[in-house]
Amino acid sequence: MANLTIRNLSKSYGAVRALDNVSLTVKEGKLAAVLGPSGSGKSTLVRAIAGFVRCDSGEILLDNRNITHEKPELRNTAMVFQNYALWPHMTIYQNIAYGLKLRKKSPEEIREKVQWALELVDLQGLEDRYPKQTSGGQQQRVALARALVVDPEILLLDEPLSNLDAKIRYRLRFEIKKLQKRLNITTIYITHDQEEALSIADQVILLNNGQIQQEDDPESIYSSPNNPFVAEFLGASNVITADILEDDQGLYVLLGGARLPVPRGKKPHDKVSIIMRADEVSQDREALGDSSFYTLKGRISEQMYLGAKRRYEVATGEGHTLLVDLEKRLPTDADIELYIHRDKLYIY
Amino acid sequence: MQNVTKSKWWQTMILKTIAMVLIGFIVFGPLMGTLLWSFAEKWFWPAAFPQELGLKYWKIAFTGQSPVLDSMAISITIALIVVVLATLISVPAGYALARFNLPWKRILLVLFLMPQAFPQLPVFINMTSIFYRYDLVGTVPGVIAVHLVISLVYSVWITTAAFKSIPVTLEEAARNLGASRLRVFFRITLPLATPGLIASSIFVFITSFDEFTGTFFIGAPFIQTLPTLMYTASMGYNMQYASVIAILLTIPALLFMLVLEKFLKAEYISGLGV
């Protein structure tokens, strides 16, 4: 178990910058989720840590050991691959034992350790099966056991759950989290699923175009996104582009009749992005207490039943369309007044 | 209701039987003719079947001064050596072509294809003139060299495909857990490529065993493999004798088909589908 430090890591494939000056620290025993769309560089990052990608510049440290130019087999990282990469010609037992054999452990120790790992992932009794004879969820656990059995300094999970169906994915997510806490192992968890990242991580690193967009704990990154990309990627349903207006009181934008402030540095006739989550508006003025809020006015143009709530499309006077989630049943074409906390509207 | 299904069952059965008989006839028909010829002691036109059957020509082929056994021994020896050499060349070549981004990759693959891409006779005539310079004409090494040139096409291409079908992540996973490149190759890559290597070896063996044109130009008349011997025999209108050799030539192919099938059923070939 170790602290991971990455300094100014860059990697280009031709004209594409897969990693662009990435720096980050993951403290011992923490789980860092690296989140981003496909092509954001998250896979390159984890493969660079494992040693399969040679970086153009920057360095990678495990505690004080500089592993930037170390061979993959000498790094003592353990990786769980997206397709599990179990060796089809070896049994589950042989798969898990292989890393220990390479470390020249005694036969008794190997047997003990493999047994420990099998119990850890709840796979006792499947030792003699071949990977093909097990289910996807079981293969995933074998891959996890194979990685954990060698006591790696850092565990690398490259989209470990993306090949499983939703139900198993959900359950395994928490199992991985529990295991990680129990073993107190520094972990990098690659995913493109924002919910997975938020629910499992101590620290979320959001990547796009090879650059870190924001790095924070899950609640902070969700409640105060740095920029529209972060907000949108973390599930904001409304991203509205509005024109900046000017009158004798200064610059402003209009949304549902509400006068919103403009971030500094903008000029008249520039555009701003307004970001708002569908479930953060309310019809109940009392519930907001005496905190400051905006009042947005509009007319319901469309609605969709979602079970616990309804999603309404609200057309504002300025010609924008807002998506809002409300529990109450309202008729289409009704005029509606919505309230939202001032700090729940992000304007960039 | 039951009658309908029963008559349907009969219909499909009859159709299937007809199809099987047709396929059997197409596959085994020509072979049957050869088989009959090899046992025919007298077979004059226009009879549909030989007037006299017997083992006379088989006996001739295997006894006394007959060159058949010698030719068979030479054919098998040459084929085995070609298999070994082709494997030794195509395993590293195939691995490199499958895994590394070689700048001259395409040219290399086309180069291996060259001997097959041109009409064979001019190629062999050129080879003969080159081989004369190095005293290889009429020698076993010369024949082996020709067979090798011809079979490397199959060998390299099949081996490349076999290595390509193994996901790189299987190798990376082993390196990640502490195995060196060399160890990964022998413990992970090679075992997983074995079914492909066996298929390639069988192909090479049969190619060499059946090869005629090149052997004729480089080897004849000093090196008599089974195919060149068969040619000599059939030139003398000795149909029976030629048929015996023809059957001997098909035996390895049939045997290897069985071996191949056994390997296709082996546990770990399922891994190739990963």
Image: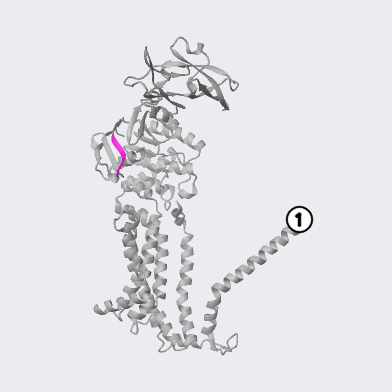
Name which residue type carries label 1.
Met
Q: Does the image show residue A151?
A: no
Up/down of B61 relative to A182, above or below: below
Quarter assignment of residue A182: top left
Any magenta on residue A187?
no
Up/down of A277 relative to B202, above or below: above
Between B173 and A343, the residue placed more toward the observer is A343
Q: Position of residue A296 (x, y in %)?
A: 48, 17
Between B232 and A274, the residue placed more toward the observer is A274
Q: Position of residue A114 (x, y in %)?
A: 40, 43
Chain of residue at mark 1: B
Q: Which residue is mark 1?
A: B1
The magenta segment is A13-21
Q: Position of residue A140 (x, y in %)?
A: 44, 42
Dot 1 crowding, Cα within 10 Å, few <14, some 14–19, many 20+ = few
Q: Does the image show residue B111?
A: yes
Image quarter where the N terminus of chain B lies is bottom right
**Residue at coordinates 46% horizontally, 72% vertically from top-left?**
B253
Left or right: A127 with respect to B45?
A: left
Coloration of the structure image: one colour
Any magenta on residue A15?
yes
**Residue at coordinates 35% horizontally, 54% vertically from top-left?**
B187
Q: Main secondary structure of the magenta part?
A: strand
Left or right: B120 with respect to B59?
A: left
Find numbered disc 1 in the image and state the secondary structure of the residue it sits on.
loop
Up/down of A331 relative to B55, above or below: above
**Residue at coordinates 39% horizontally, 51% vertically from top-left?**
B167
Between B128 and A124, the residue placed more toward the observer is B128
Between B36 and A112, the residue placed more toward the observer is B36
**Residue at coordinates 57% horizontally, 70% vertically from top-left?**
B23
Q: Position of residue A310 (x, y in %)?
A: 56, 24
Q: How many marks?
A: 1
